[in-house]
Amino acid sequence: MNLSPNLSLSEATKSATAIRHGIDNKPSAGHLAALKVTALKIFQPIRDHFSEPIAVTSGYRSLALNRRIGGSTTSQHSLGEALDLDADVYRGVTNQEIFEFVRDNLEFDQLIHEFGDEDNPAWVHISYREGNNRGQILRAYNSNGKTKYKSWI
């Protein structure tokens, strides 16, 4: 099943952790509907713009999977509203280019420059909430072993 022309449900739900621990990572009908919207409003415009493969390193996460990996209890991944993208996997486009394209061209709830360095995030977190997007831009960094966030300047 495809969520958008270039994103399959299996790509958006695949998790080595879920497989390893026997965790069901199948979205509910509501989460699937949100995931489709996220794919169409976020993933597909990026894929169309760059005409290059874009890896989803984290998509939908069931509550059990999210707990297992230590994700935030309010993670939009568990609602089908967020994708972590990593173009550097394919080396056709940089994560920074994705970040800048989304920032400058798409409607989003959160856009997070995740770790990496000033020039290129390790991956890009993007969330989308139908009709309720904040347009919040953050940078994730490590402080004493904890993930912290600061507003993008």
Image (spheres, rainbow, N blue to C red):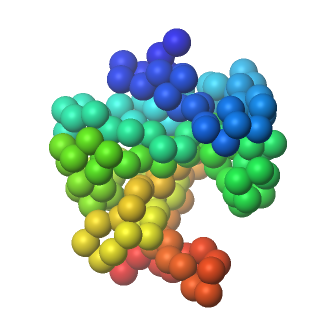
Q: Is residue 1 above or below residue 49?
A: above
Q: Is residue 100 above or below residue 46?
A: below
**Residue 130's x, y, as percent?**
56, 39
Residue ranking furthest to the front? 20
Left or right for 45, reference 148: left
Residue 145 seen from this side: yes
Q: Is residue 45 above or below residue 104?
A: above
Q: Is residue 29 above or below residue 114?
A: above
**Residue 16's x, y, as percent?**
61, 38
Q: Nearer the viewer, residue 42 or 139?
A: 139
Residue 45 seen from this side: no
Residue drawn at 72 percent across, 21 percent down: 29
**Residue 152's x, y, as percent?**
41, 76
Residue ranking furthest to the top? 1
Q: Nearer the viewer, residue 36 or 72?
A: 72
Q: How many marks?
A: 0
Left or right for 134, reference 95: right
Residue ranking furthest to the bottom? 144
State which quadrant residue 111 falls in.
Answer: bottom left
Q: Nearer the viewer, residue 69 or 101?
A: 69
Residue drawn at 54 percent across, 23 percent down: 10
Residue drawn at 19 percent across, 32 percent down: 51
Q: Look at the image and tell me in which quarter the C terminus lies.
A: bottom left
Left or right for 66, reference 114: right
Q: Nearer the viewer, residue 5 or 153?
A: 5
Residue drawn at 35 percent across, 31 percent down: 44
